[in-house]
Image: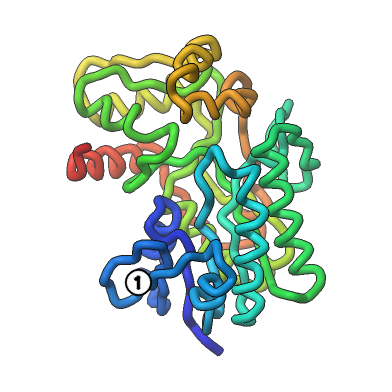
């Protein structure tokens, strides 16, 4: 059996973390992106096309789907991308591991578990629910083996296109105000990128992961105020923090498309948004969870070495 592990979207934050985790574990890795580099495992392909997806997945034992359309194009493009990638995975006879998130649930009134209904009514949430349905239908029909690993907002080395990225870490290092998107005092599950990668690789390696979605393990939920406090404690200097309110988001969104898109899922920002990962912890004996103090320190160090 092949030991080739293929990572789609390998230059993104999650994809590059998965490549690093697989490489550290001794796996043979193909790192796929549209503009791949010159490393021994780098592979250039456009997986939005059937030909590109088949070429990218050829010979794989496991395919990690970390590629995604632009955030504002999820509703229009994510289901089609998923159908194309399923064709590539099926042609290779491989297992699919989907890097998923928590959008499918919609607004919640308690900790999220994997059996919660997919109640999202917003376009992005509906698109993610359709993606999940396509993958699990392909698994149930016997076309492929598949599993999904869900994570909340992430931070970590290399994490720049995230709400817990430059506006928090780079800002603190520059002595500027570190900004949290939403209410500073609502508990929120946040995931550390290397932990996401470790969880996804576990799902890829274990047969008992197949056929369902899992909440990837994380450190405890924190409020924005608590998280920014950890950042400033590690960065040093006089703490300067702020939360972005719904009103400010609407105002800034008038001229900033990225901020405007956040309004669709503001329910993740104005109330507790906590994922229960106990199923994963009960099922898999080796669970990698980095304390936030360590994750914050490592992320700050990465930002120091990689100034904008």
In-front residue for pair 236/46: 46
Residue occupied by mark 1: 42
* Residue 226: image location, x then y, percent: 43, 23
In-front residue for pair 121/98: 121
Q: What residue is at 62 percent from the left and 28 percent from the top?
A: 265
Q: What residue is at 48 percent from the left and 72 percent from the top?
A: 6
Tell me if I can see residue 184 in this picture: no
* Quarter of the view holding residue 20: bottom left
* Quarter of the view holding residue 126: top right
The C terminus appears in which quarter of the rendering? top left
* Residue 75: image location, x then y, percent: 65, 43
Q: Secondary structure at mark 1?
A: strand
* Residue 18: image location, x then y, percent: 43, 61
- 249 lies left or right of 102: left
The N terminus appears in which quarter of the rendering? bottom right
Q: What residue is at 57 percent from the left and 42 percent from the top?
A: 73
């Amino acid at each position: 059996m092949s030991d080739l592990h293929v990572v789609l979207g390998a230059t993104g934050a999650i994809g590059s973390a998965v490549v690093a985790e697989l490489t550290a574990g001794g796996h043979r890795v193909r790192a796929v992106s549209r503009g791949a580099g010159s490393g021994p495992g780098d592979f250039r392909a456009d997986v939005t096309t059937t030909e590109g997806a088949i070429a990218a997945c050829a010979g794989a034992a496991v395919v990690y789907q970390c590629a995604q359309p632009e955030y504002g194009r999820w509703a229009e493009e994510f289901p089609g991308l998923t159908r194309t990638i399923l064709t590539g995975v099926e042609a290779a006879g491989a297992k699919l591991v989907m890097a998923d998130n928590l959008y499918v649930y919609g607004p919640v009134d308690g900790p999220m578990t994997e059996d919660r209904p997919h109640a999202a009514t917003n376009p992005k949430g509906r698109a993610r629910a359709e993606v999940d349905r396509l993958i699990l239908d392909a698994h149930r029909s016997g076309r492929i083996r598949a599993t999904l690993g869900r994570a909340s907002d992430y931070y970590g080395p290399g994490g720049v296109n995230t709400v817990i990225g430059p506006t928090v870490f780079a800002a603190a290092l520059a002595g500027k105000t570190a900004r949290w998107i939403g209410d500073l005092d609502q508990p929120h599950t946040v995931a550390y990128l290397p932990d996401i990668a470790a969880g996804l690789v576990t799902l890829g390696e274990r047969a008992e992961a197949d056929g369902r979605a899992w909440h990837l393990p994380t450190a405890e939920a924190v409020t924005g105020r608590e998280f920014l406090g950890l950042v400033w404690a590690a960065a040093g200097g006089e703490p300067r923090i702020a939360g972005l309110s719904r009103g400010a988001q609407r105002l800034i969104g008038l001229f900033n498309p990225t901020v405007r898109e956040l309004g669709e899922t503001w329910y993740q920002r104005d109330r507790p948004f906590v994922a229960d990962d106990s199923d994963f912890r009960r099922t898999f004996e080796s669970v990698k969870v980095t304390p936030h103090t360590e994750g914050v320190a490592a992320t700050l160090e990465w930002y120091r070495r990689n100034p904008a």
